[in-house]
Image (cartoon, rainbow, N blue to C red):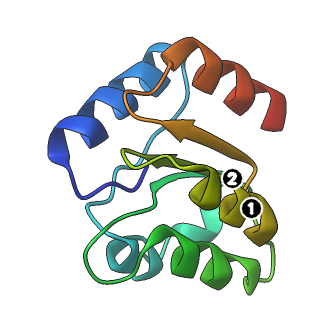
Amino acid sequence: MVDDDESVRMALSSSLRSASWNVIAYPSADHLLGDVHRSKLNLVVADIQMPGMDGFALLESIKQWKRPIPVIFITAHATQEIYERARAYGAAGFFSKPVDDARLLALVSELL
């Protein structure tokens, strides 16, 4: 889970944990990319608009990993253009904030 907004990060992490998923929460893309244990990740839920590296740049970095993993985008600024860009970049899912927890958990279950 990557989001610069602590309240969103905590809420979504809690929701995912309630469904028995192991969750690591990062305040930025740089924190995730700097984690020496990132190769153990199976999926990333990431905000698109973050200071520094945005979600699109994070997804491009993940695509370069030896074992790329699915990335689900969330955003408070959902527009058709952002949605289409997310699809073009290969995002595994796209949710506007506030996130529909049931739909997110269903997609995570489907992907994993």
In primary-sequence order, the first of circles 2 and 1 is 2
- Alpha-carbon distance for marks 2 and 1? 6 Å
Contact flag, marks 2 and 1 (Cβ < 8 Å):
yes
- Badge 2 element: loop
Mark 1 — residue?
69
Q: Is residue 96 left or right of residue 14?
A: right
Is 32 rendered above or below residue 8? below
In this orientation, which residue lies closer to the viewer: 4 or 19? 4
Mark 2 — residue?
42
Identify the residue shown where x is 63% and y is 43%. Answer: 94
Neighbour class for label 1 at 10 Å: few (<14), some, many (≥20)? some
Q: Is residue 62 left or right of residue 67?
A: left
In this orientation, which residue lies closer to the viewer: 103 or 69? 103
Q: x%, y% of residue 77?
A: 40, 50
Identify the residue shown where x is 40% and y is 73%. Answer: 29
- Badge 1 element: loop
